[in-house]
Image: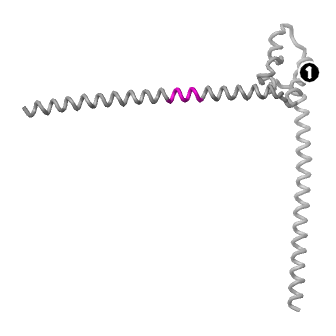
Amino acid sequence: RDRDRDRDRDRDRDRERDRDRNRDRDRDRERDRERAKENAAKREQSKKNDDSKPSIQFAPKAQNPLLAGEIDLVAQSKKKADPVSIEEKLQELKKSKEDSAKPVFLTKEQRQKLALERLENEREEQKKKAEEASRQRQKMMEQLRRDRDRDGREREREREGEREREK
């Protein structure tokens, strides 16, 4: 009898815990859905604001050394002497934003070229560090030699002084 009661109590407790967990999960899911909706609304609002207020942003593509041949907005604006209409400027900005959003895929040759340039730069840096270290070592050795020579001369003077005192 006692065992049966204990089992029943345990089952009831387990059921309550499960219900509580399920409620918590449901609440969390609902909160997540609400947050997702709010974030989507904020993103939409910010997109609308971005479209209404264009700003000049330079795309990473323009900074890529392999794509240096592409014309950027600054170079175009400097070349033109006549005033640019607002519509044209907006179109250029929109196009540059679209281009900057697209990923830049490099060919195998381009990746190899960049890797070689990085390796070359690293080697040059290591070479400079090694040269600097050897210069410092040379300076230190020269200083030690000077100190040793100076100490030797001082010892000789001291010995001569002692010899003269003995006489």
Res. 54 in view: yes
Estimate the x, y position of residue 124 in percent, counting from the top left: 61, 25
Amino acid at the residue labelled 1: Gln
Tell me: residue 85, above or below residue 153.
Answer: above
Q: Is residue 128 magenta?
A: yes
Estimate the x, y position of residue 43 in percent, counting from the top left: 89, 39
Q: Nearer the viewer, residue 34 or 122?
A: 122
Q: How many marks?
A: 1
Q: Is residue 91 left or right of residue 108?
A: right
Q: Is residue 144 magenta?
A: no
Look at the image and tell me in which quarter the C terminus lies.
Answer: top left
**Residue 80 found in image quarter:** top right
Look at the image and tell me in which quarter the N terminus lies.
Answer: bottom right
The kind of secondary structure element at disc 1 is helix
Residue at 21% in and 30% down:
156
- Seen from this angle, which residue lies furthest top? 81
SS majority, magenta: helix
Estimate the x, y position of residue 155 in percent, counting from the top left: 22, 32
Residue at 90% in and 21% down:
90
Report the magenta residues as a range.
126-133
**Residue 11 found in image quarter:** bottom right
Tell me: residue 1, above or below residue 144.
Answer: below
Residue that mark 1 sits on: 91
Q: Is residue 141 left or right of residue 92?
A: left
Residue at 89% in and 55% down:
31
Res. 57 in view: no
Q: Residues within 10 Å of mark 1 (few under 14, many from 20)?
A: few
